[in-house]
Amino acid sequence: MSSGNLVKDILKEITSKLAPHVERASREAQLLLMYHLEVDELWLITNQEADVKESDKLLKLAERRAKSEPLEYITGRVSFYSEEFFIAEGALIPRPETELLIDEVLKNIADKNANITIAEVGVGSGIISIMLAKFLPNANIIAVDISEVALGIAKKNIELFGVENRVALRLGSLLEPVDEQIDYLVSNPPYIAQSAELEPNLSYEPQNALFGGEIGDEIIKKLLDEVLSRKINFFTCEMGYDQKDKISAYLKDKSFAKLEFYKDYSGFDRGFTLRL
Ligand SMILES: C[S@@+](CC[C@H](N)C(=O)[O-])C[C@H]1O[C@@H](n2cnc3c(N)ncnc32)[C@H](O)[C@@H]1O
């Protein structure tokens, strides 16, 4: 039962519902309430005594969150690289460390106005391809995914950001649906080992976005094979914190110009750029 319908009371009630299950219960209560009422931070601060309409619906959202459903799937919104994207079940929720993959790519492209063709394998919600399209005004991007649901979510975001003339979506595995000559391949592929035990909130995310095979690095290795056989000049890829040695070993006898690893915000190895 709700203790009252005022903003301040509902916030208190939701916070205590969420507290045993989520770290930032009070903040998440505010975010759920702002989403439910379609109001902003300023409104929330200045309207603590206002009535919350349809508070039962809001409490149902809080119950979903208390069962570990990610806040982003409940609200349909996610922030990435200071932009707001649409998100829904069926596409991975973008992670902050993937911003670093974008920085790596931009670092390697000296001429931001170059007319280049980029391919992304595993587009998910579209965040990487869309941000690259924004930063590289003359780049054409071919974005592949094996999930039709993910492609539907990416399509929505591509339209939201108005880059549909430069980001083409294709259904398929790896680079199968791409015949064009590619200058730069990017990917945040699934890279978790099949046997890994995951936190409860991850059970809501698409499993084919998380698991890369029995060992975890199988898809990364397939992408490396593609890069080498198609002679793609640059490849920037996110990876698991413990995959650096395996990737270095896989490339040991191969011919390429440079392999550089980068770290994430916590100092863990998180990805690499291979230059042929
Ligand atoms: C870790 S998610 C990355 C999503 C998004 N690019 C991001 O960074 O948030 C991996 C994506 O790869 C897709 N995927 C998995 N196996 C694939 C394959 N063999 N070929 C193409 N895409 C694949 C999944 O459907 C998922 O959307």
Image (spheres, rainbow, N blue to C red):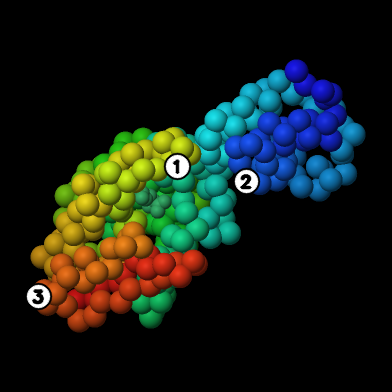
Q: Amino acid at mark 1?
A: Glu
Nearer to the camera, 226 or 193: 193
**Mark sitting earlier along the chain (2/3):** 2
Left or right: where does residue 241 sit relative to residue 175? right
Seen at 83% across and 31% down, the residue is: 9
Q: Amino acid at mark 2?
A: Glu
Q: Position of residue 156 (x, y in %)?
A: 46, 41
Quadrant for the C terminus, please.
bottom left
Callout 1: SS: loop
Q: Amino acid at mark 3?
A: Asp
Crowd around label 3: few <14 · some 14–19 · many ≥20 (10 Å) = few
Left or right: where does residue 86 sit relative to residue 218? right
Query: Could you give the CA–CA distance between mark 2 and mark 3, rounded to whole angstroms?
Result: 46 Å
Can you see residue 146? yes
- In the rendered image of this protein, does residue 114 appear above or below residue 122? below
Closer mark to the observer between disc 3 and disc 1: 1
Query: Could you give the CA–CA distance between mark 1 and mark 2, rounded to whole angstroms?
Result: 14 Å
Left or right: where does residue 43 sit relative to residue 20? right
Q: Which mark is residue 253?
A: 3
Q: Which mark is residue 188?
A: none
**Mark sitting earlier along the chain (1/2):** 2
Q: Which mark is residue 23?
A: 2
Quadrant for the N terminus, please.
top right
Query: Could you give the CA–CA distance between mark 3 and mark 1, rounded to whole angstroms?
Result: 37 Å
Label 1 sits on residue? 199
Q: Position of residue 251 (x, y in %)?
A: 16, 71
Callout 2: SS: loop
